[in-house]
Amino acid sequence: MRKIKRVRFLWTIIKRTHAERLVYSLLVSVFVSALILCLVEPDINRYGDALWYTCVSIFTIGFGDFAAVTVTGRIVTIVVTLQALLVLAIIPGIVTSYYIDVVKENRKESVTLFMDKLERLPDLSREELEEISERVRQMTK
């Protein structure tokens, strides 16, 4: 159940950053490349085998059970592999950037609330003053 939540959270970040286009373009490329390979490669006669070969190429596993022998097949393999490497390299950067932005925004809101309390110092209760005092102590450590 936790893994599903993590995947949903990851997909939410991808959608909020509009990176889903990259993911969709990669998926389309995989299926189109498999179709092209199925048509041009003499040893790959079934679409499932072509899809398998494409996935193995994308993740640079290279089991060797199929290999592109035609120029077209090799070019398709190179293009889809490079696209996958780029997309799969960009996604962690997008997630990290999003996380950093969220942390900065939370910090900014926290500082704004803290400054607001400091401006209203005479109006604060004893508990609020103790809370501010504790936060200041933590900041100076």
Image: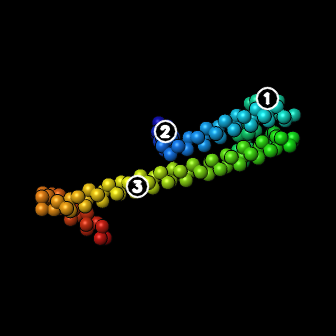
Asked if disc 2 and disc 3 are in contact, CB closer than 8 Å, the reply is no
The answer to whether residue 48 is above or below residue 18 is above
Please indicate whether residue 42 sits to the left or right of residue 118 in the image. right
Please indicate whether residue 29 sits to the left or right of residue 107 in the image. right
Between discs 1 and 2, the one toward the N terminus = 2
The outermost residue toward the top is 46
Please indicate whether residue 39 sits to the left or right of residue 15 in the image. right
The residue drawn where x is 26% and y is 56% is 113
Amino acid type of disc 1?
Arg
Amino acid type of disc 2?
Arg
Residue hosting label 2 = 8
In the rendered image, is residue 110 in sight?
yes
Between discs 3 and 1, the one toward the N terminus = 1
The residue drawn where x is 78% and y is 34% is 36
**Residue 67 point in image, percent of width and height:** 82, 41
The residue drawn where x is 50% and y is 46% is 17
Q: Nearer the viewer, residue 91 or 43?
A: 91
Between discs 2 and 3, the one toward the N terminus = 2
Q: Nearer the viewer, residue 38 or 28?
A: 28
Nearer the observer: mark 3 or 1; the answer is 3
Spatial separation of the CA atoms under disc 3 and disc 1: 49 Å
**Residue 97 point in image, percent of width and height:** 49, 54
**Residue 35 point in image, percent of width and height:** 76, 32
Q: Secondary structure at mark 3?
A: helix
Amino acid type of disc 3?
Val
Residue hosting label 3 = 103
Q: Secondary structure at mark 2?
A: helix
Asked if disc 1 and disc 2 are in contact, CB closer than 8 Å, the reply is no
Q: Which mark is residue 46?
A: 1
**Residue 86 point in image, percent of width and height:** 65, 50
Asked if disc 3 and disc 1 are in contact, CB closer than 8 Å, the reply is no
